[in-house]
Image: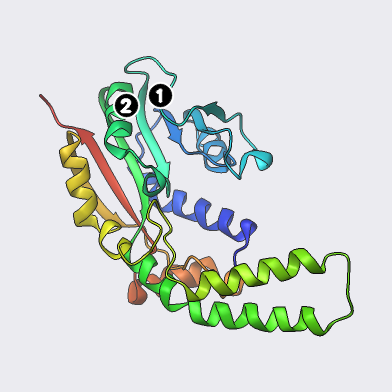
């Protein structure tokens, strides 16, 4: 079941696992920073960090870092302003990726590069598989709400459980697609390589992050992060890291 606190722990561990790809003392733009929890961690590691996201982001009320609001299209920074552009599970939600990548090229200083973390095909497949038991858990909770004495918070709980059931049984899209089946391709390393190449980027490295989880978080914190790293060796990594650099012209 979805849990924002557990998601924060996952994102922090993913950052730890990809930190080796970040050049020391770099000026970093985190694109799609959410609450800013990763931007704050990067700042504490000694990086000069600027974070940006939509004002309408659902994470806005819980920000822990001065995240800059923007219009969702033009990035309000000077040319060559950053050494590294970092994003974590964001690009799959962007409707006009080619334009965004052209903006990234504009913002990178000479020798600069991007580190993008994105959900993998493994994550997409296991999220489908875990949907049925997630829907079963939601159904059980909904039944308990229905037979329990009425309470003030009963309505929101019933709606949340119904949303869990529907989300578990239907192959809904996670990114820009309404349906999720196409994401078995669009989340692949081959698909993203093609997108980056067409946008004028050279893909220098693609590697699994090395931690297993699904979009439904069925077991949640009951499976430790260390155990999830162990599981990723057999069940696959939930996220893939892409290190890309503008192709010299």
Picture quarter with the C terminus: top left
Give me the disc on residue 74.
Answer: 1
Residue 7: x and y in percent read 56, 57
Q: Which residue is mark 2?
A: 103
Residue 234: x and y in percent read 34, 77
Q: Dot 1: within a 10 Å radius of its alpha carbon, few (fewer than 14), some, or many (20 or more) residues?
A: few
Picture quarter with the N terminus: bottom right
For the point 37% across and 66% down, the residue is 124
Provide the secondary structure element on which disc 2 rests: helix
Q: Answer whether residue 223 is visible to the viewer in this image.
A: no
For the point 47% across and 70% down, the residue is 228
In the image, residue 53 above or below residue 93: above
Provide the secondary structure element on which disc 1 rests: loop
Q: Are marks 2 and 1 in contact (CB under 8 Å)?
A: yes
Q: Dot 2: within a 10 Å radius of its alpha carbon, few (fewer than 14), some, or many (20 or more) residues?
A: some
Q: Nearer the viewer, residue 151 or 118?
A: 151
Numbered marks: total:
2
Q: Is residue 244 left or right of residue 41?
A: left
Q: Is residue 172 left or right of residue 116?
A: right
Q: Quadrant of residue 9?
A: bottom right
Q: Is residue 29 left or right of residue 97?
A: right
In the image, residue 18 above or below residue 233: above
In the image, residue 108 above or below residue 9: above
Q: Nearer the viewer, residue 145 or 38?
A: 145
Residue 66: x and y in percent read 61, 29
Q: Answer whether residue 154 is visible to the viewer in this image.
A: yes
Give the mark, 2 or 1, whose residue is nearer the N terminus.
1
Q: Nearer the viewer, residue 42 or 33?
A: 33
CA distance separating discs 2 and 1:
8 Å
Q: Quadrant of residue 198?
A: top left
In the image, residue 148 above or below residue 55: below
For the point 34% across and 70% down, the residue is 236
């Amino acid at each position: 079941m979805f849990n924002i606190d557990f998601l924060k722990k996952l994102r922090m561990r993913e950052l730890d696992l990809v930190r080796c790809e970040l050049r020391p003392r770099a000026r970093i733009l985190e694109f799609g920073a959410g609450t800013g929890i990763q931007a704050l961690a990067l700042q504490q590691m000694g990086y000069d960090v600027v974070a940006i996201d939509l004002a309408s982001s659902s994470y806005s009320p819980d920000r822990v870092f001065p995240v800059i609001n923007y219009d969702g299209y033009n990035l309000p920074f000077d040319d060559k302003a950053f050494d590294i552009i970092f994003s974590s599970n964001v690009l799959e939600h962007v409707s006009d990726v080619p334009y965004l990548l052209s903006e990234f090229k504009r913002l990178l200083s000479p020798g600069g590069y991007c580190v993008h973390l994105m959900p993998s095909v493994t994550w997409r497949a296991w999220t489908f598989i875990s949907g049925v038991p997630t829907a079963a858990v939601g159904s059980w909770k909904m039944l308990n709400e229905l037979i329990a004495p009425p309470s003030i918070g009963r309505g929101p709980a019933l709606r949340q459980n119904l949303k869990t059931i529907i989300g578990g049984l239907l192959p809904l899209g996670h990114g820009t697609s309404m349906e999720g089946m196409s994401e078995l391709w669009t989340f692949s390393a081959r698909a993203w390589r093609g997108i980056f190449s067409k946008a004028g980027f050279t893909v220098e490295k693609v590697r699994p992050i090395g931690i297993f989880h699904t979009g439904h978080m069925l077991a949640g914190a009951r499976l430790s992060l260390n155990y999830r790293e162990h599981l990723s060796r057999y069940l696959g990594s939930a996220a893939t890291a892409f290190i890309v650099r503008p192709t010299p012209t």
